[in-house]
Amino acid sequence: RCTMRLRMLKMSSKLLPNFKGYCSSPEIIMLFVYMKARFALSYRDLEEMMHIRGAVIDHSTVARWVGKFVTLVECRVRQRRKPVNGSWRMDETYIKVNGRWVYLYRAVDSLGNIIEFLLREKRDLAAAKAFFQKAFRSSCRPDKVNIDKSGSNIAALKALNKSQPKTIEIRQNKYLNNIIEQEHRFIKKKTKPLLGFKNLISAENTLAGMECIRMIQKGQIFGQTKNFCSFNNFASLMA
């Protein structure tokens, strides 16, 4: 059981039933979730940090907390996220899962606001199409999308254009994608200490938390602005 005083983070009463049966307080659990998603720390790093503060917690317990409760953060972020503009930049990056590379599809708008993310085992037409469909559901159809030279991405957009009256302009301007390629660094920096994920579900949950905290950092939540201390925004979101 982990016992610490935590005054800055106070959970909404609507979220408390999700923590029924857990010995540690909801505030402590969500603090661990935040720290894992915000900083480039391994689970053993978090265990040692809490030991220094006088709290006894096993790294495997923290991993289970992240896997279960990161969905609460994602749900709150999606409910209160500001809309993005109609000019998108889309790209993929590599993430290691169980010793092999898989693909993390990501998109931002022209201002750098995160639109959507999706982890897939293969980089093909089905994966690209699934990503765009997920992005359209969460943020509506854009006016234009800038992509790389990947044939599967072009094919996916052309197929989606045929099924809808509104045609999306497809662009392949290399320098326009600099903003999304730079954004990949923040994810890579946090996943590097992990030396890869054990399975796809664990990777999806952890990456969702990282993406959501990144949105909070950028001030993409209604009622919030870009803040030097993103934990303040996180605390107000969960209150």
Image: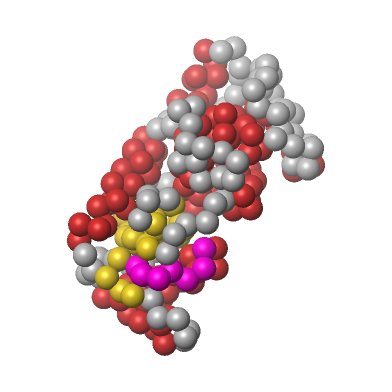
Q: Splitting the image into 4 quarters, where does residue 153 fall?
A: bottom left
Most foreground residue, 212 or 69:
212
Query: Image point 45% across, 81% down: which residue?
Result: 166
Look at the picture and state if 45 lies above or below 82.
above
Look at the picture and state if 212 lies above or below 2.
below
Query: Image point 48% across, 84% down: which residue?
Result: 164
Most foreground residue, 23 or 165:
165
Q: Is residue 144 magenta?
A: yes
Most foreground residue, 31 or 172:
172
Image coords of residue 22 (percent x, y): 74, 34
Q: Is residue 53 magenta?
A: no
Which quarter of the figure is the N terminus placed in? top right
Look at the picture and state if 65 lies above or below 59.
below
* 32 sits to left or right of 180: right
* 33 sits to left or right of 214: right
Image coords of residue 36 (percent x, y): 50, 34
* 155 sits to left or right of 137: left
Image coords of residue 32 (percent x, y): 57, 31
Q: Which residues are magenta?
A: 139-145
Q: How many labels, in total?
A: 0
* 117 sits to left or right of 2: left
Query: Image point 48% across, 31% down: which residue?
Result: 227
Which quarter of the figure is the C terminus placed in? top right
Q: Splitting the image into 4 quarters, where does residue 88 fall?
A: bottom left
Q: How is the image coloured?
A: secondary structure
Image coords of residue 232 (percent x, y): 57, 29
Q: Which residue is at the far left? A: 174
Query: Image point 64% across, 34% down: which residue?
Result: 236
